[in-house]
Amino acid sequence: MALPEILTGLKVVIKNVFRRKETVSYPEARRQPFPRFKGRHILDRHDDGLEKCIGCELCAGACPADAIYVVAAENTPGQRFSPGERYAQIYQINYLRCIFCGLCVEACPTEALLMTTEYELAGTSREELIYTKDQLIVDVPILRHWESKRELAPDLSASRRVQGLERDARQPEAFPPKESP
Amino acid sequence: MSEIVLIALVKAVVAFAALLVTTILVVWIERKVIADMQSRIGPNRWGPFGLLQTLADGIKLFFKEDFRPRTADRWTYALAPVMAMVPSLLAFAVIPFGDQVRIGDRRVDLIVSDLNIGLLYFLAMGSLGVYGVVLAGWASGSKYPLLGGIRASAQMISYEIALGLAVVPVVLAAGTLSTVEIVAAQTGGVQNVTFFDGIPVLEQVANLFRYVPNWYIWSQWPAFFLFLIAGIAETNRAPFDLPEAETELIAGFHTEYSGVRFALFFLGEYVHVVVISAMAVTLFFGGWDGPVFGFLPWIWPILWFILKTAFFVYLFVWLRATMPRLRYDRLMWLGWKRLIPAGLVWIVVTAVVNTEGIGRNARLAVFGALFVLVLIYMGRGDPRLTQAVAPQRRRLRSGTA
């Protein structure tokens, strides 16, 4: 007789009805990614406004997906872009190829190339998804990439369970919503 | 004369429209409830709480290409979806959805047609629905639909017997095949409980039975279980959805259907769910029976009927969210070796117990004893499983594990 087993199953299923929903109503409410989530890249600047990128192409060399294209040029006394000898004249990342592994960031000797938590990288054409230098370079490092009505703290329950600290408890103050730049 | 025709026409049109709207709601309920059970949000884009999602899907289906495979049998292919949907709509005709209402000096039963053979008609419509599925599978001229159709025919024939057998005890108890009279027999509270007569305190307690509704579920619960299982199998829904088993047969009998024709199959399935739920309510849960209050007295029976039916629709969805699909031979095993014998035995028990001269006490004793027996049988668990885990349990208990 399978009836007790069926009843047990029904009980398990009905429990979920009274639990918190795991998904969010996406465009209206977004879940904030973990702070070290690997999203789209930025090219950082020094405090004096010079680009950190020195056009060494190590990122392009490290890239397993061959998504980065760099052409370096010499800085001249009249036109100085970076503190080093050279700067990136052309810098492109093809987001159709990028696998967001972060090896480029690790390879960068000047910490010019960084990754943000932005993951909304849809486009309507192939050309649109090849990001050029003027799209990647920033004046102020991006801390937060969206304006949303409601932002949810990242779900820490999984890691917490591993550490055996707490079960299914949310601590939003661990990652407070950052101010928009 | 023309007045009668007009009333019949209005009832038919209203019931038809209500059934279609209900179907839209049921599809929404199913998606929302399953989302609940899987900790998701579910459809929420179109209309408040996503209520209009089904409507949008329906409109989309109407504008889709009406594809027909080259190998399909043209006329049968076109006819099958209609044959799948129409009987399930027709079956609703014999379900009473409210008490008599008074319009002018005329008393109108809230039922499309009070046939004196209502239950027989209901079973007949269920059988006709099989043709739509089987012919759809055969007419598609493709292997997966054919397999689905064959499965459907075997499954529905087996479970139709169980469904018929589950209905018979209720007919025996009520002494009629008319659904209106079956509901009428279930109104009011449980009367004449003489089981505790002569026992000082319990005698007073027995009086409280007046407040318990006199539904057939109390005495006919085995028939109800049979009806529920056979009913789910009859509607081809999980865990008995073998004719469309998407993991094995793509989509079974409606693999080759698209657009409006697919929408008809879809509609037919959900109407069938509503009709089976409504029939379970009618037979075992007193139909529209329930407390009536002063404000708009005619609306309460309809409300009770809708609430009870909604509960069974929820149960259908709940079961779908819980249970995996049965293996085909297990399905046949359950139908022929368990449900049909159980149905036959229960008919005999009901027939004996309902014989003149056997008092209510004897009846209660028989039903009670049976209930206890079934509980014992259920509680013992699967012997194979018990054997398998026995050594482990022993070790756990002795603390050596």
Image (cartoon, helix red, strand yellow):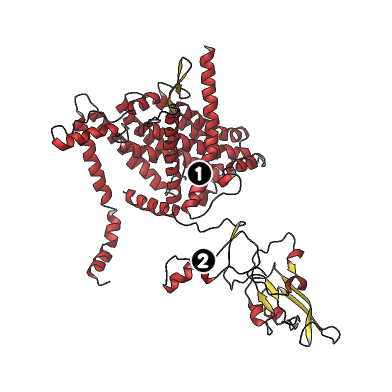
Q: Is residue B384 above or below residue A131?
A: above
Q: Residues within 10 Å of mark 1 (few under 14, many from 20)?
A: some
Circles 1 and 2, Cβ within 8 Å, touching? The answer is no
Which image quadrant is residue B221 in? top left
Q: Is residue A80 left or right of residue B283?
A: right
Q: Position of residue B286 (x, y in %)?
A: 36, 31
Instruction: Tell me the SS state at disc 1.
Output: helix
Instruction: Tell me which amino acid carries mark 1.
Output: Ile
- In which chain is the residue bearing label 1? B
Q: Is B157 in front, or is B306? A: B306
Q: Is residue B128 left or right of residue B285?
A: right
Which image quadrant is residue A38 in? bottom right
> The C terminus of chain B appears in which quarter of the rendering?
bottom left
Whether discs 1 and 2 lie on one chain: the answer is no
Q: Position of residue B105 (x, y in %)?
A: 46, 14
Q: CA distance from mark 1 to mark 2?
A: 29 Å
Q: Which mark is residue A155?
A: 2
Q: Which residue is mark 1?
A: B29
Instruction: Tell me which amino acid carries mark 2.
Output: Asp
Q: Residue at x 42, y 30 (%)?
A: B301
Q: Residue at x 79, y 85 (%)?
A: A86
- In which chain is the residue bearing label 2? A
Q: Residue at x 63, y 76 (%)?
A: A102
Instruction: Tell me the SS state at disc 2.
Output: loop
Q: Residue at x 61, y 56 (%)?
A: A28
Number of marks in the image? 2
Whether residue B95 is visible here, answered yes or no, is no
Which image quadrant is residue B257 in? top right
Q: Is residue A57 left or right of residue B314?
A: right
Q: Is A122 in front, or is B401? A: A122
Q: Position of residue A172 (x, y in %)?
A: 52, 67
Q: Is A144 in front, or is A75? A: A144
